Image (tube, rainbow, N blue to C red):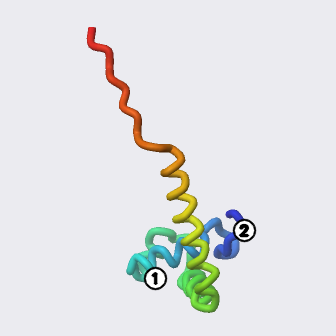
Amino acid sequence: MGGRPRIQGTRIRVMDVVSWIVHGGAGIDEYIEQFPLLTGGDVHAALAFYYDNVELIEDEFRDDWVAEARSARASGPLALHPTSAG
């Protein structure tokens, strides 16, 4: 997972939990409904890690946003190709 903190035994990153619950306003129960392999303890542990390491996790979000913006700029405007009418 790119070295990013994740819930032990899963591929779910702490920043995924934060995105849904902290940034998105979803409840813990809603998150667990979407990812039933997780327990409430798993989600609370991820949130505890976030609150103990806010700067680290928020830096990960910024890194992703910057990378997405660079990728969008690099791909340039969408090219439209006229179809042949025959």
Residue at left offset 56%, top offset 80%: 39
Residue at left offset 36%, top offset 31%: 80
Q: Measured from the top left, where is residue 23 in percent x and y? A: 43, 78
Is label 1 in a helix, a strand or a loop?
helix
Quadrant location of the C terminus in the rendered image: top left
Residue count near mark 2 (Cα–Cα under 10 Å), binned few <14, some 14–19, many ≥20: few
What amino acid type is highlighted by mark number 2? Gly
Q: Choose the circle earlier in sequence order: 1 or 2.
A: 2
Q: Relative to 48, is 18 above or below? A: above
Q: Residue furthest left?
A: 85
Q: Is residue 42 left or right of residue 1?
A: left
Query: Is there any visible trace of residue 41 in the rendered image?
Result: no
Q: Is residue 60 left or right of residue 75?
A: right
Toward which corner of the image does residue 4 lie, by quadrant?
Answer: bottom right
What amino acid type is highlighted by mark number 1? Val
- The reply to whether the C-beta atoms of the residues labelled 1 and 2 are less than 8 Å apart is no
Residue at left offset 68%, top offset 63%: 1
Q: Residue furthest top?
A: 86
Residue at numbered disc 2: 3
Q: Relative to 61, is 2 above or below? A: above
Residue at numbered disc 1: 22
